[in-house]
Amino acid sequence: MIILLADSAPHVGFGHIRRMMTLYDFLKNDFATSLASLNPPPSLIKEFQENNISYTSLKSLNHLELKEKNPNLNFIVFDGYDFSDKLINSFKEIGIGTMLVEDFSNCIKSPDIILNHSPGCSGHMYTGNYSLTGPQYSLVNPVFNTKNNYSYKRGQVMLSYGGVDPMGLSLPTLKALLNLEEKFSIYLLAGSEEKAKEIESQLLPRQRKEVEILSNIPAASVAKIMSTSEFGIFPASTIAMEACQTRLPIIVTQTSDNQELYRKGLVELCLAHYIEPKNLGSTKLLTCAIAQLRAQSSNLLSAQEYYFDGESKTRIINEINKFLQAQNEI
């Protein structure tokens, strides 16, 4: 049995749990798999139930307790910033295989396998560890494998800074888009209903007609908006990876330290156009960025096609199978 253990605390956003939900979807037909999280919010529990996802709500991280509840447990995947070498080793010491999913290239050394799907990541960053790195191991929900089956609309833009938006960029970027000479139809995906209402309250009545502010919508709805948009504006994070899988030209920015690998890779691999966060509220600089994006779009889409080939599920399953077979032979 495989347990997928994710950090779902509101202050870190929902990127970790979303990745584990994707991995759950990848593994569920090949392995007995269950999600686990410390005190997940009610909205997530409801989503698990609606999608028939097996899950365990934990009150503490105790390897013996988790093993007692799941006696057939033989592999555990961690995704979060607060899982230490000591914790990971506690599972290894009782014969459980371990994988760490991360995007920070941090100093954790103990996992049997490290998976980092950041476009800027390569295996040499994890000397001494068995690592799966880069977009070929991307944890992107399969619903984003649309490859623009919908007809995109010129002038339609999708804007999102994730569940947290730590730099508060949603409103200034939105106002800059609304003030451009060229008029856009804008979809803004806010992190919560409260955030959506807060942003809407700061718009003029005429501006509200040009933007649709959404929150807590399913991945399939996000994929459809991406597939009908001309371009998107996102942080250099998993949502940018989802856009690449969908084949959407994107402008990205870096809103936190852990996005540095994403940003470098997205730009170096010609997957996205980069803009500094401070420039997103400037109509002049945003106009230039959109013009540059349009000039680059064919190259960006070709790179997205090359690096996001839709085979990451097969690669990850093969690697886990290979590890478990080797473990059984010991």
Image (tube, helix red, strand yellow):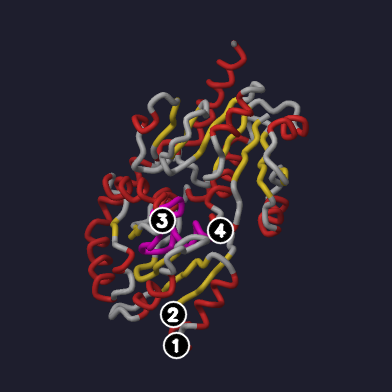
Mark closest to the chain's N terminus, 2 or 4 = 4
Query: What label sits on residue 240 in the rendered view?
Result: none
Q: Which residues are magenta?
A: 221-239
Question: Which secondary structure, mark 2?
Answer: loop
Residue receiving disc 4 = 11
User: CA separation, marks 4 and 1?
Assistant: 33 Å
Camera-nearest label, 3 or 2:
3
Check disc 2 and give the amino acid type: Glu
Residue at 29% across / 61% down in the picture? 275
Q: How far is disc 2 from disc 4 in space, using C-alphas?
A: 30 Å
Q: Measuring 51% from the left and 38% from the top, which residue is drawn there? A: 101
Residue 95 in percent (x, y) is at 64, 21
How packed mark 3 is, by other alpha carbons closer than 10 Å (few <14, some 14-19, many 20 or more), is: few
Q: Amino acid at mark 1?
A: Arg
Q: Amino acid at mark 3?
A: Ser
Q: Which residue is mark 1?
A: 206
Gap between marks 3 and 4 measured at Cα: 13 Å
Say the numbered circle drawn on residue 256: 3
User: Which mark is first along the chain, 4 or 3?
Assistant: 4
Query: Sequence order check: which comes first, mark 3 or mark 1?
Result: 1
Secondary element type, mark 3 = loop
Question: Where does label 2 land, which residue?
Answer: 210
Q: What distance separates the C-alpha of mark 3 from that of mark 2?
A: 29 Å
Q: Give the class, few, some or many, for how many residues have Cα within 10 Å of label 2's Cα (few <14, many ≥20).
A: some
Percent of width and height locating residue 5: 62, 40
